[in-house]
């Protein structure tokens, strides 16, 4: 009986330590999550230079209006836009070896690069790749108008 109880306790300890390890974030998840937070901070501070080094030279973004832009255009637009408020939510990082996919939503208010009022409520997907030098860079981004949130706000 004592032997059986001992085995039960050992099994319980091993299974609970396995559960706790699966809920912990990997170093890759933490690194990419920190870069996404830097991107948010760059918007909050109206300072795209904060994120520029973490955006790949061959970066491509598909905006919610369908327009495809590169790194240069993305940074120029960010520099010309002025945000009064910027927030992210529901951010999830999923790592696949040397690549990571980040999904979430962003709410931005201010003025766009043309000086027009800006009120953005979008879902986004960012693709990050761990480069040969060990740094993570965003290689692609895609935004979609978050019509579900707009519908809920109108109710």
Image (cartoon, helix red, strand yellow):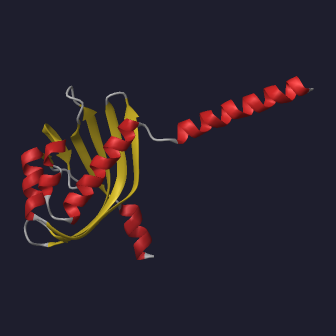
Which residue is farthest bottom?
155
Residue at 32% from the left image edge and 42% from the top image edge: 31
> Where on the picture, by quarter, is residue 154?
bottom left
Quarter of the picture containing the C terminus is: bottom left
Q: From this view, report whether residue 67 is shown above or below residue 140.
A: below
Residue at 43% from the left image edge and 37% from the top image edge: 26
Total of numbered circles in the picture? Answer: 0
> Where on the picture, by quarter, is residue 102?
top left
Q: Percent position (x, y) of residue 2?
A: 89, 27
In the picture, measured across the screen, residue 95 lies left or right of residue 21, that is: left
In the picture, measured across the screen, residue 78 lies left or right of residue 144, that is: left
Residue at 26% from the left image edge and 47% from the top image edge: 142
Relative depth, front residue between 82 and 38: 38
Quarter of the picture containing the N terminus is: top right
Which residue is farthest right?
1
> Where on the picture, by quarter, is residue 111?
bottom left
Q: Percent position (x, y) of residue 42?
A: 20, 58
Q: From this view, report whether residue 103 is shown above or below residue 82.
A: above
Residue at 35% from the left image edge and 57% from the top image edge: 105
Q: Percent position (x, y) of residue 69?
A: 12, 47
């Amino acid at each position: 009986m004592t032997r059986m109880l001992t085995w039960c306790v050992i099994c319980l300890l091993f299974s609970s330590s396995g559960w706790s390890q699966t809920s912990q974030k990997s170093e890759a998840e933490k690194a990419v999550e920190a870069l996404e937070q830097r991107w948010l901070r760059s918007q909050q501070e109206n300072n795209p230079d904060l994120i520029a080094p973490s955006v790949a030279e061959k970066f491509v973004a598909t905006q919610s209006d369908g327009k495809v832009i590169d790194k240069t255009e993305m940074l120029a637009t960010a520099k010309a836009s002025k945000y009064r408020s910027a927030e992210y939510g529901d951010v999830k990082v999923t790592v696949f070896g040397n690549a990571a996919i980040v999904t979430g939503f962003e709410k931005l208010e201010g003025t766009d690069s043309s000086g027009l009022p800006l009120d953005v409520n979008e879902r986004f997907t960012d693709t990050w790749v761990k480069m040969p030098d060990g740094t993570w860079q965003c290689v692609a981004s895609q935004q979609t108008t978050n019509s579900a949130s707009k519908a809920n706000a109108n109710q």
